[in-house]
Image (spheres, rainbow, N blue to C red):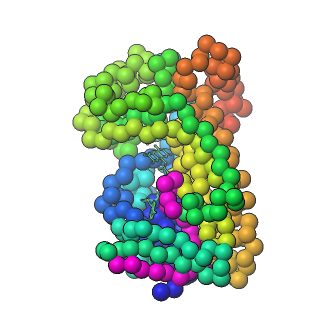
Amino acid sequence: MYVPVVIVGSGPAGLLLSHLLKRRGIESIILERKSREHVEGRIRAGVLEMGTVGLMRKIGVDQRMNAEGILHDGIYISVDGERHHINMKELTGGQTVMIYGQTELTKDLIAVRLEQGGEIVFEAEDVSLHDIESDRATVRYVKDGAEHSLTCDYIAACDGYHGVGRRTMPENRLKTFERVYPFGWLGILAKAKPVADELIYACHQRGFALCSMRSETVVRHYVQVPSDARIEDWSDDRFWNELRRRLGPRDAELVNEGEVFEKSIAPLRSFVAEPMSHGRLFLAGDAAHIVPPTGAKGLNLAASDVHYLSQALIARFCYNDERPLAHYSQQATARVWKSERFSWWMTSMLHRFGDEGTFDGRMRRAELDYMLSSKAGKTVLAENYVGLPF
Ligand code: FAD
Ligand code: DHB
């Protein structure tokens, strides 16, 4: 069977791409390794840039997001218990962010895609990509024990860091860049009222903490933990106590405890693979790059990649212009590196690395103090946090 575009992965990148193409009459099929329940149950990011919100509005999958998403004008940075406000709206000439869980966004994108008759093959096993340097590519997979084969003009690998897309690129074409941080984030979801009206990013001698939310009744909180931390060692009580200590006495009073219904540890890393395309294969989202979560950029970067990729595929299919596809990797990586820089910068300033008594440690602290004391510094944070244009 032939389809113009095969999309591997039904995370935010793959789903958004299928909608953006459909809007211009370009058909695609999504192959997803996991079940629908699994994909819809994964707890991940929570902050949408206005560019991402704009894409959801453009494809018309915005009803629930408009009703339930919470707009935030700023964030708080707490340093050893003292809170500073970054008013992003004022500093960026009116831009804000929206709190809306990746889980909800994914559910909305899947539901509307299926309603519109789009095809998502869940539990597609052994997806393999062939002939990416030929006139037509082939994608093979197994579903319910039967082998299937699709021919297509282009493959969009939106299959995350562990996917098959990047691994199919010739090794000698690919250059990778990586930094692994010596800590992770322990995150919980709990039925409780948020600590404050906006997110609090806390830098404390005991380590980083983040108070986020999903709604007025559900909170998402994180604490920095060593890379080898084990979830069994973190009882709910231990988590709440540690969070309070890192917020300092004043904000500790504002922490509302509630039933914890999810708890997990995520490692922190920065990773970029270049180029993001080879022949008929195009990488987007986590398949090509990972950011540490401190800047809330992972999901948003996946969205900006697919914006560029959809534009390039539309140019090819609707106007027979192949040039944007040839420039996709260059265009996408230029923005990727800026988000990598921001995520690395936020991570460096706000976490404990264990070398606070050294020159590097003092530099990181000076960077934070300077940023908070300077309108120019806060503006740098604000304009990156709300998202660079695309
Ligand atoms: P994904 O969402 O990873 O989607 C890729 C999809 O491809 C998945 O559904 C996967 O099952 C599928 N797939 C993989 N391999 C194959 C294959 N061989 N065949 C078929 N399908 C395949 N970002 C933040 O900003 N804040 C956070 O708090 C945050 N927390 C995170 C926690 C975790 C545990 C992880 C992994 C990521 C987190 N992120 C966070 C990052 C953010 O969620 C990602 O950047 C975002 O999901 C990227 O979207 P994507 O569509 O590129 O990839
Ligand atoms: C959330 C995650 C982040 O990485 C972040 O920077 C802000 C919020 C969240 O899950 O709510």
Q: Is residue 32 left or right of residue 261?
A: right
Start and end of the magenta stretch? 146-164
- Residue placed at 39% from the left, 68% from the top? 125
Q: Nearer the viewer, residue 253 or 304?
A: 304
The residue closer to the viewer here, 186 or 251, is 186
Residue farthest toward the top in the current orientation of the protein: 357
Residue drawn 43% across the image and 40% down it: 266
Q: Viewed as shown, does residue 343 lie left or right of 267? A: right
Q: Is residue 390 left or right of residue 30?
A: right
Q: Is residue 149 magenta?
A: yes
- In the foreground, 216 or 252: 252
Quarter of the image where one finds residue 281 = bottom right
Q: Residue 9, position in %: x, y?
A: 46, 64
Percent of width and height locating residue 339 = 64, 46
Viewport quadrant of the C terminus: bottom right
Residue 131: image location, x then y, percent: 60, 76
